[in-house]
Image: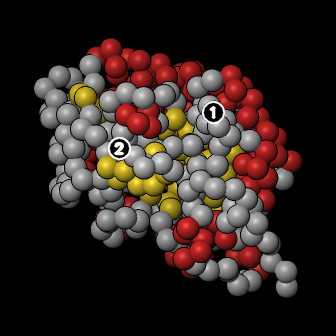
Amino acid sequence: MSHSLFDAFTLGSTPLSNRIAMAPMTRSRTSQPGDVPNAMMATYYQQRADAGLIITEGAPVSAVARGYSMTPGIYTAEHIEGWKKVTQAVHAGGSKIFIQLWHVGRRSHSSISGQQPLSASACKDPDKVFGPLPEGGFGMVETETPLAMTQADIDQTIADFVQAARNAVEAGFDGVEIHAAHGYLFDSFLRPASNQRSDQYGGSQQNRIRFLVETLQAVSDEIGGDRVAVRLSPHIMEGFAADDAEIEEVVLKALAAIAPMKLAYVHFSERISRYVEVPESFRRRVREIYPHPVMVAGKLTCEMAQAMLDKGYADLFAFGTPYITNPDLATRLRNGWPLRAFDPDARLTLYGGDAKGYTDYAPWQG
């Protein structure tokens, strides 16, 4: 029996109206001080509630986890109250919503997080993130060399993710997605270029997946595996100067280790930044090793997503950039209506600012 992107789908115990997800995208529109989610953000997400599932922009799980200015946290009472506006708006719009839990690791600067960044090892590659400029205002700033995490740092970080998941449930989220992609904290543990540790979290492939597996297990134990997801990007080299010959094998080992947790889904981010195309052999091996829902994101078209669904390689398909300028994207795709292009003006309003380029894109008028 063939399936369509527009068929209903159930994630664990969460029913979705279709297989289309809104991908997580940093927009830096919080209220200051405190990086608190606000009513404008609630409007933005509600406008896009024709997606079966919305995944929020990355939400730092602590102050040191922060790597982009004005991103919404999930570690204070004010954050929880702010996010309640968002979850209520999205549920009223008919969609489900997972929050992406974020620790950027070395992709940060002390002017953003308030302290020297933490990572697997004290390794730095050329990299820029959105933060305060020395001359005033905000823009792209070069990252700092991180400190290698101690065992106490690792234990605290796992505890931070567990608390953030607890906070997310209190805020009304249907689940959480742990960001382990794009050169951020967990990704830096997976790759030998950024993980030069000699303890139980470094060296062998099994050791390099340990931190991620322990965190996913702890969060699943807290809120239930069916409300936990993880994002991975083995074919993207964002935040790294060199390619990684081992990363496919490392990720497959991680999938085998987490399969018993029966997570809501595993989310593969693809075809952004510096990347290689995903070989079909990898998609087949994922399906052999991992029997639970798989989501794919990365410059997808409807046709590409449907082809992957037909081959059984993935169950859910996340669209990012098109959702910025097309708040009713799933409806447009279902009806074959034209999409509004992501033009240079849209790029200028990606990070920070007000409603312009954020909540002022209209649905299809006909």
Which numbered circle lies on residue 53? none
| Residue type marked 1 | Pro
- C-alpha distance separating marks 2 and 1: 22 Å
Total numbered badges shown on the rendered structure = 2
Q: Please tell me whether mark 2 sits on a helix, a strand or a loop.
A: loop
- Is residue 40 in view from this perspective? yes
| Residue type marked 2 | Arg
Which residue sits at x=23%, y=28%? 148
- Is residue 21 in view from this perspective? no
Quadrant showing the C terminus: bottom right
Point out residue 346 in the picture as x, y percentages from the top left corner.
60, 71
Which numbered circle lies on residue 33? 1
Point out residue 75 in the picture as x, y percentages from the top left corner.
58, 25
Label 2: which residue? 107
Q: Residues within 10 Å of mark 2 (few under 14, many from 20)?
A: many
* Left or right: 179, with 274 as reference point: right
